[in-house]
Image (cartoon, helix red, strand yellow):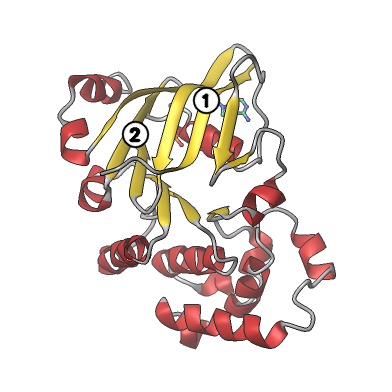
Amino acid sequence: AKADPILKVDKITRQFGGITAVDVEHLEVQRGVITALIGPNGAGKTTFFNLITGFDKPTSAGHGAHWEFDGRALNRTSASSVARSGMVRTFQLTKSLSRMTVMENMMLGAQGQAGESLAKALFRPFWAGEEKQIEEKALELLARFKLHEKRADFAGSLSGGQRKLLEMARALMSDPKMIMLDEPMAGVNPALTQSLLGHIQSLRDEGMTVLFVEHDMHVVRHISDWVVVMAEGRVVAEGAADTVMSNPAVIDAYLGAH
Ligand code: ATP
């Protein structure tokens, strides 16, 4: 396939004290495909997510450091403008979001980032005037994810799998170009696994770019078009799922973790 990167990252580094959590030389995510980011515990996957979404800042923006999303430089961008540019991540339900209804969670998603500034979002309902359309969109998405009947329930009462669906539906409220999922299958019971995988694939089939972090290799093999492997903060391998998972460097990276 012809390369058409939606996300391009060059030289991004993050250290915590003496630990180099992320030291990525170059990484691209292609538009319209599902890319899995895998690697042993502590490889730097979450830190990388935080960096590119503006939730964390790189340690040094040295020579050649540059990253861009959809043709737009992100080096000095806040989390909310990253979200507005179309790169949106899912958030696990926090305590305060659990105490809100499913529908209220969706309305916050329309704000762009439910995780970032809950209080601000609540006091500044940007959708004033457009409430009707936003509500309709929320209801459509809830129907799509079969959460329609739960709309008045507290989000905290949902099962593990339903929470993951809500996290995804909420992220979609801002019409992202790329959705980033952190372990979308964690805590999901087997009955909902297939349905979640199906939802992720349909998003891709509709043209959305998906980047996800996942430990379950069956899931990775099953739905990824491309797999990027991180170890000790670096990209150590990438390629099609089957190729990557039979790569000695990848096997080493995982064995190294045990
Ligand atoms: P996992 O698969 O377990 O979630 P990961 O690949 O997401 O791991 P990170 O959570 O990004 O890895 O962690 C990378 C390294 O950075 C680890 O050594 C971790 O201990 C360290 N680290 C991450 N966040 C912080 C922090 N806020 N303060 C100090 N060290 C941190």
Place of residue 184 in the rendered image (x, y in percent of width and height, measured from the top left): 40, 54
Based on the displayed image, in which of its 4 quarters is residue 72 positioned? top right
Residue 5 x, y percent position in the rendering: 43, 41
In the rendered structure, which amino acid carries the disc numbered 2? Val
Classify residue 20 as left or right of residue 61.
left
Classify 10 Å Cα crowding around label 2: few (below 14), some (14-19), many (20 and above).
Answer: many
Structural crowding at the residue carrying mark 1, measured as other residues with C-alpha within 10 Å and reported as few (<14), some (14–19) or many (≥20): some
Rendered image: mark on residue 46:
none
Q: Which mark is residue 10?
A: 1
The earlier-in-sequence mark between 1 and 2 is 1
For the residues labelled 1 and 2, the Cα–Cα distance comes to 15 Å
Q: Is residue 27 left or right of residue 223?
A: right
Residue located 42% across and 35% down the image: 28
Mark in the foreground, 1 or 2: 1
- Residue placed furthest toward the front: 2
Residue labelled with disc 2: 228
At x 62%, y 20%, the residue is: 16
Nearest the eye: 189 or 248: 248
Amino acid type, callout 1: Asp
For the point 60% across and 35% down, the residue is: 51
Residue most toward the right?
A: 123
Judging from the image, what secondary structure is the residue with disc 1 in?
A: strand
